[in-house]
């Protein structure tokens, strides 16, 4: 196997499946099966989950809410998704811990780096909820931060497109996919991989990012096995 420990970033929207809002239980169990296949190989899996299927801070702010208050709602949305994902993983027989950046002791463990790493070593999936715990950040930033902290080998950004393209492939049929690209080229070409804060944090820490289609069955296992799918961003 190519990696020992991975950090999988899933957006909140990915959990919607065919729905317009909220969580699709079918999608959750499909993801759980994908993750189980990876755990069975002995690779350690940590997950950062977004909250966009429930609430985004900027949306609240755009209709007049206080931004910080609104971001707190967004962070709590990620905890709801984390609980749902934990449930689906445990239904699939995978031991799982949810750790949150905001303390909710009755519901989840607080984020403690050493404890998270110990869970991973024991073969438990660790889900990080609550983003970074700070307003004005995104769960992409949380994904990079946690990946660095737990010394993950790579960030796997599971999306609904199969990589990074010269233009948005859902809008431009001429768009061409990159198999590999450097951090510098992503910035130079103004391509959208993650928000700039998250992206530069990954670059500065030489942490590669692989963007791939999470909705294609078997893809997650292929990526961790080193099969060349999606787009790899590295130095
Ligand atoms: N959020 C935040 N700080 C963080 C991470 C997330 O305030 O460190 C809030 C923010 O309001 C954001 C929401 O949580 O809009 C949901 O996260 P995100 O938009 O990253 O979710 P995704 O797009 O991955 O579903």
Image (spheres, grey):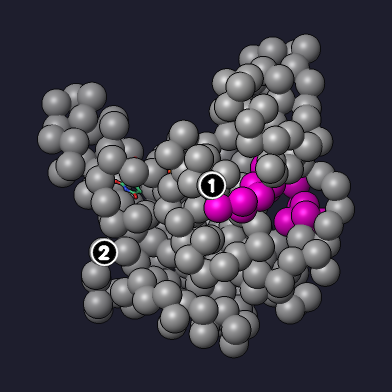
Quarter of the image that includes the C terminus: top right
- Residue 161 or 118: which is nearer the viewer? 118
Which tag, 2 or 1, sits closer to the chain's start?
2
Region in magenta: 205-223
Return the x and y of residue 83 as percentages of the image width and height: 41, 66
Q: Who is closer to the viewer here, 17 or 34? A: 34
Q: Quadrant of the N terminus?
A: bottom right
Q: Describe the element under mark 1 as helix, strand or loop.
A: helix
Horizontal and vertical percent position of residue 63 = 19, 25
Question: Going by the picture, which residue comes out furthest to the right?
Answer: 227
Q: Quadrant of residue 183?
A: top right
Residue beneath the point at 56% across and 74% down: 125
How packed mark 2 is, by other alpha carbons closer than 10 Å (few <14, some 14-19, many 20 or more), is many
- The residue that disc 2 covers is 102
Q: Which residue is labeled 1 in the image?
A: 204
Q: Secondary structure at mark 2?
A: loop
Is residue 24 rendered to the left or right of residue 159? left
Residue 193: x and y in percent read 58, 34
User: Is residue 211 highlighted in magenta?
Assistant: yes
Whether 116 is among the magenta residues is no
Ligand 1 falls in which quarter?
top left
Residue 29 visible in the displayed image: no
Rounded to the nearest whole Å, what is the CA distance between mark 2 and mark 1? 26 Å
Say if 65 sits above or below 104 in the image.
above
Which residue occupies the foreground of this view, 52 or 197? 197
Side of 113 relative to 68 (left or right): right
């Amino acid at each position: 196997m190519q990696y020992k420990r991975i950090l999988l970033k899933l957006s909140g929207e990915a959990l919607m499946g065919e729905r317009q809002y909220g969580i699709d239980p079918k999608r959750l169990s499909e993801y759980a099966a994908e993750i189980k296949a990876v755990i069975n190989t002995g690779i350690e899996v940590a997950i950062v989950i977004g909250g966009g299927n429930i609430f985004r801070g900027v949306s609240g702010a755009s209709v007049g809410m206080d931004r910080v208050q609104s971001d707190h709602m967004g962070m709590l949305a990620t905890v709801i998704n984390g609980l749902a994902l934990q449930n689906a993983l445990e239904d699939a027989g995978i031991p799982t811990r949810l750790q949150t950046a905001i303390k909710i002791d009755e519901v989840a463990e607080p984020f403690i780096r050493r404890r998270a790493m110990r869970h991973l070593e024991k073969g438990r999936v660790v889900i990080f909820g609550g983003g970074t715990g700070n307003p004005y950040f995104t769960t992409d930033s949380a994904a990079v931060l946690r990946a660095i902290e737990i010394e993950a080998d790579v960030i796997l950004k599971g999306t609904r497109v199969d990589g990074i393209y010269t233009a948005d492939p859902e809008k431009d049929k001429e768009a061409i996919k990159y198999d590999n690209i450097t951090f510098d080229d992503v910035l130079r070409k103004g391509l959208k991989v993650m928000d700039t804060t998250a992206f530069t944090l990954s670059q500065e820490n030489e942490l590669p990012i692989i963007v791939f289609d999470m909705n294609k069955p078997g893809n997650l296992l292929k990526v961790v096995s080193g099969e060349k799918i999606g787009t790899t961003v590295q130095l």
